[in-house]
Image (cartoon, rainbow, N blue to C red):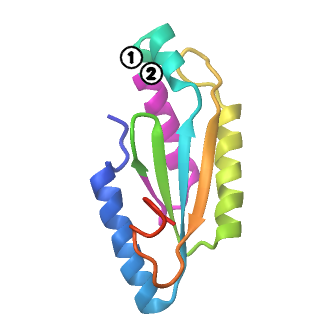
Amino acid sequence: MTGVYNRLTIDQMILHEIVRSKRYGSSFSLVMLDLDDFKKINDTFGHHVGDEVLRSICRLLQEKVRITDKIGRWGGEEFIILLAETNISDAFLAAEKLCRMIADTPVGNNMRITASIGVCSYKEGQTMEDGGAYW
């Protein structure tokens, strides 16, 4: 529906990136993005509007991330973005820009929404299970 990777596929891409990082000593980061108060959109305007908001957000993300970055839908209104060859400080800057872009861009019925973010970077020797779901 959204045109981004599903959770299973993005998990496989993260595992691939871990292997690549171990082999070449490269870094990568993840951005977890959660649309704020999304339930209100569905409850107020209906799921068809909520679905259009999700599609609009995914289009925005796809336009703004690099071609080497991967976007996946983690849950209902949660997304994860794999930033290849990106350290934590650069990932944080990218995440802040994405949040500002989302807040500044009307979607759906000319609504403005916001997103909350979390950022982490891979450290050598870690697995997907270390420290919870990710690092």
- In the rendered structure, are the residues bearing label 1 and label 2 in contact, judged by CB atoms less than 8 Å apart? yes
Query: Which element carries disc 2, helix, strand or loop?
Result: helix
Residue 123 position within the rendered picture, expressed as x and y whole percent measured from the top left: 54, 79
Please, is residue 60 above or below residue 85 in the view?
Answer: above
Q: Residue at x 49, y 32 (%)?
A: 56
Q: Amino acid at mark 2?
A: Gly
Q: Position of residue 51 (x, y in %)?
A: 40, 24
Q: Residue at x 46, y 11 (%)?
A: 43
Examine the rendered structure and indicate whether residue 88 appears above or below residue 110: below
* C-alpha gap between disc 1 and disc 2: 5 Å
Q: From the viewer's perspective, is residue 63 above or below residue 105?
A: below
Q: Residues within 10 Å of mark 1 (few under 14, many from 20)?
A: few
Q: Which residue is mark 2?
A: 50
132 above or below 125?
above
Give the magenta-colored segment's residue range. Answer: 51-71
Instruction: Answer with left or right where residue 9 lies relative to residue 121.
Output: left
Circle 1: residue type = His
Q: Residue at x 40, y 50 (%)?
A: 72
The picture quadrant where one finds residue 116 is: top right
123 falls in the magenta region: no
The circle on residue 47 is 1
Residue 66 is inside the magenta segment: yes
Q: Residue at x 52, y 25 (%)?
A: 38
**Quadrant housing the N terminus:** top left
- Residue furthest top in the image: 44
Q: Main secondary structure of the magenta part?
A: helix
